[in-house]
Amino acid sequence: MQRNLLRILPLLLIAMIVHPLHAHVGSPDVYEQGNAGPYKLFVVLRPPAVIPGVAEIEVRSQTPGVDRIDITPIPLTGEASKHPPVADSMKRPSSDPQFFTGHLWIMATGSWQVRFTVSGSQGPGVLSIPLPATAMMTRRMQPGMGIMLGLLGVLLVVGLVGIVGAASREAQLAPGTNPPPARIQRSYVVMAITLVILIGAVYYGNKWWGAEAANYSNYIYKPLRMDASLQAGNVLDLKLTDPGWLKQRKLDDFIPDHDHLMHLYLIRWPGMGVVFHLHPDQVGTGDFRLTLPTVPAGDYHLYADVVHATGFPETLVSSIKLPYVAGRSLQGDDAEGTAGPLKWNGDGTQTSNSYKLPDGYTMVWKKPANLTAKTPEEFSFTLLDAKGQPAQDMALYMGMTGHAAFVKTDGSVFAHIHPAGSAAMSAMMMAQSQNQAEASASQAPAMSMSSMPGMNMSQPSLPNVVSFPYGFPTAGSYRIFIQMKHGETVETGTFDADVSN
Ligand SMILES: [Cu+2]
């Protein structure tokens, strides 16, 4: 029995490590839309609350005729990615024929993908969505449970001392006879020795438990640490260090994600009235540098998105107090936005659903009547020219029709979202290229990058509308920064959202 307990305890400990993390901050669920062959799917992946644990999966097909969807969890890279396990099939939980749910066991921390194999009236199709899964903290034992287990433990110790005492006193007596005083004396000695041994066992058991817990805490996700400093008046230096996590994590294996190794959002705090989207260069291992544009003075929160070679994305967080920086003008993919400060911080006002841009253009949010946490939603924005007509000169901004950042006003959530969704673009590309490679063998048409939402390069003119699939992780107040490009101008619109439970 005790040996079994010893075997089970480490598993229990693993199960107590909870909260997976995504590329973003505080926003672990993946919202993504893509094409599985002829079928357009809106996918929600909710990573497990424990590792190993169960990922909850929802799919809404926007194309009718889907008969069956099979799901498989596969590592995104490495040898194991070529040997997928047997697929599970998704269920239709309601009478809605286009809504499917399912769940998958995710057995280890790391960079995963979920492959959706679809069959239906228009033939087969396949789509893969990246799923970074990792544990973020240890769940503490609930006080009630602790007290109950403690009392049971005391009962066990007292009971065992009593049993040993009774055994040494009476085991060799004939039934019905009273123990002589010498035996009673001896039983007290035996009970005292037993108690000492048991206290020792509890003490060392606790030490062993602590060592196991410390061991497993190594698997709890700790993002790379980023320290920001201002050098030579206008150079922002970002030093990355590893606070210790999985040994596989490296500081020199970043891959470009939509054209850049790092996407840095610089947001003035707490008003969130100034935002920059900039792209520091890697100048050495774990060292990124950027010559700043002109930046107003203030306290800034820094959110830096990077992606490792495994397709594992991280968002690094830091802050810096900046004086007024007289820098260069904006260039390349740089973008800047200014808005009124948040109404939640003093006397600012909440932005309306129609945001007036500095060059006379207007960005309009088709805002849903109600926004609730954890609900998949399409956030749709339209760009109008100075005359209020649909903007005609739309351009791609870093290869896409738009970029969005959803930031909670208490700083606990930051999510950088694209028209295809919340997965890192480079991880998305890895997953799709595997499907492309296997497509010829399996006959199932896979999605090409140019058919991903918001990346359609083949269209002669780009739409003036962009939509982002996303769901707020928690209730509260958020500010949303939307970037669209027309001509040579990158526009940054600012919108506020109150999200209920
Ligand atoms: Cu982006």
Image (cartoon, grey):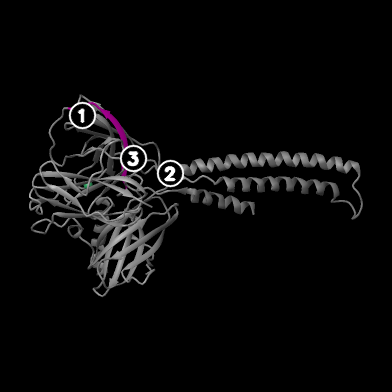
The numbered mark, 3 or 1, whose residue comes first in the sequence reads 1
Which residue corresponds to the image point at 42% horizontal and 45% vertical from the top-left? 136
Q: Amino acid at mark 3?
A: Gly
| Disc 3: CA contacts within 10 A as few (<14), some (14-19) or many (>=20) | few
The numbered mark, 3 or 2, whose residue comes first in the sequence reads 2
Label 2, label 1: how far apart the Cα atoms are:
34 Å
Find disc 1 in the rendering and name its residue.
235
Q: Residue furthest top?
A: 232
Q: Position of residue 117 (x, y in %)?
A: 31, 66
Q: Is residue 320 magenta?
A: yes
The secondary element bearing badge 3 is classed as loop
The secondary element bearing badge 2 is classed as loop
Residue 216 is left or right of residue 69, and the answer is right
Q: Amino acid at mark 1?
A: Val
Which residue corresponds to the image point at 38% horizontal and 70% vertical from the top-left? 94
The secondary element bearing badge 1 is classed as strand
| Quarter location, residue 236 | top left
Q: Position of residue 36 (x, y in %)?
A: 25, 65
Q: Which is the main secondary structure of the residues drawn in magenta?
A: strand
Q: Is residue 252 magenta?
A: no
Compared to 291, does 406 lie above or below? below
| Quarter location, residue 489 | top left
Label 3, label 2: how far apart the Cα atoms are:
21 Å
Of 341 and 480, which appears nearest the observer?
341
Find disc 2 in the rendering and name its residue.
220
Residue 429 can be seen, yes or no: yes
Find disc 3 in the rendering and name its residue.
411
Q: Position of residue 64 (x, y in %)?
A: 26, 71
